[in-house]
Image (cartoon, rainbow, N blue to C red):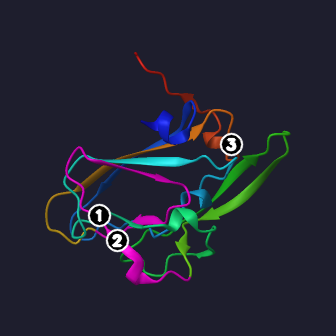
Amino acid sequence: MVRELLDGQPQIVQTMYMAKQPEGGTGVALHQDTHYIRNEPNTLMACWVVLSNTDRDNGGLCVVSGSHKRPLYRTRLPSDDTQHASWEKDYEMRDAQGKTWTESMHSHEVDGLDLEEIEYLTVPRAGGVFFTSMTINGSFANASSDPKRLAFATHYVREGTWVYRRDIQNTVPVTSGN
């Protein structure tokens, strides 16, 4: 499936296990993945697989339909720390010519978003959602009393794509047993 969506050989950039605690486990503010994983050409896409039923109440994934066709939005630090985690970290970067630098990165929240555009997805256990790096996505706090909201995300790029962050430059090819 990923090979078809990327129109080429997929490479895994990173995987993330996300266990959101009940009664307040914070989410990830609405963002575009390109803010976190700059790549060239921009072939980055995500697959979000849920390990427990997810919906609006337990902080499930939300997206803005059609945002993948829009430009990269400006961002700011998340404004509500009861809903979204806020952090700042330095990352080592390297371009294809070998130039290196350090870049300070922070958690992103899209500026200028019409909140009426947000779609709160209900995804059953073992279901998944694919989206591009330009799709505005995120989640809010888990307001349910039980259980944890569990999800696993994998970020892919097409073979030949340059990833700037040094900590995730060693991509892993996806192979099939077919």
Identify the element where label 3 is drawn.
helix
Is 10 inside the magenta-drawn segment? no
Would you say the residues marked 1 and 2 are in contact, meaning their CB atoms lie under 8 Å apart? yes
Identify the element where label 1 is drawn.
loop
In this rendering, position of residue 71 left or right of residue 50 = right
Q: Residues within 10 Å of mark 1 (few under 14, many from 20)?
A: some
Which residue is at 56% across, 30% downward?
9
- How far across and how far down the image is residue 95, in percent? 79, 45
Which residue is at 61% across, 46% downward?
43
Of badges 2 and 3, nearer the viewer stands: 2
Q: Which residue is mark 1?
A: 121
Q: Which residue is mark 2?
A: 119
Q: Which residue is mark 3?
A: 166
Quadrant of the rendering where the C terminus is positioned: top left
Inter-mark Cα distance, 2 to 3? 33 Å
Identify the element where label 2 is drawn.
strand
In the rendered structure, find residue 173 and report the number of the disc placed on it: none
* Comes first in the chain, label 2 or label 3: 2
Segment tinted magenta in the rendering: 112-141
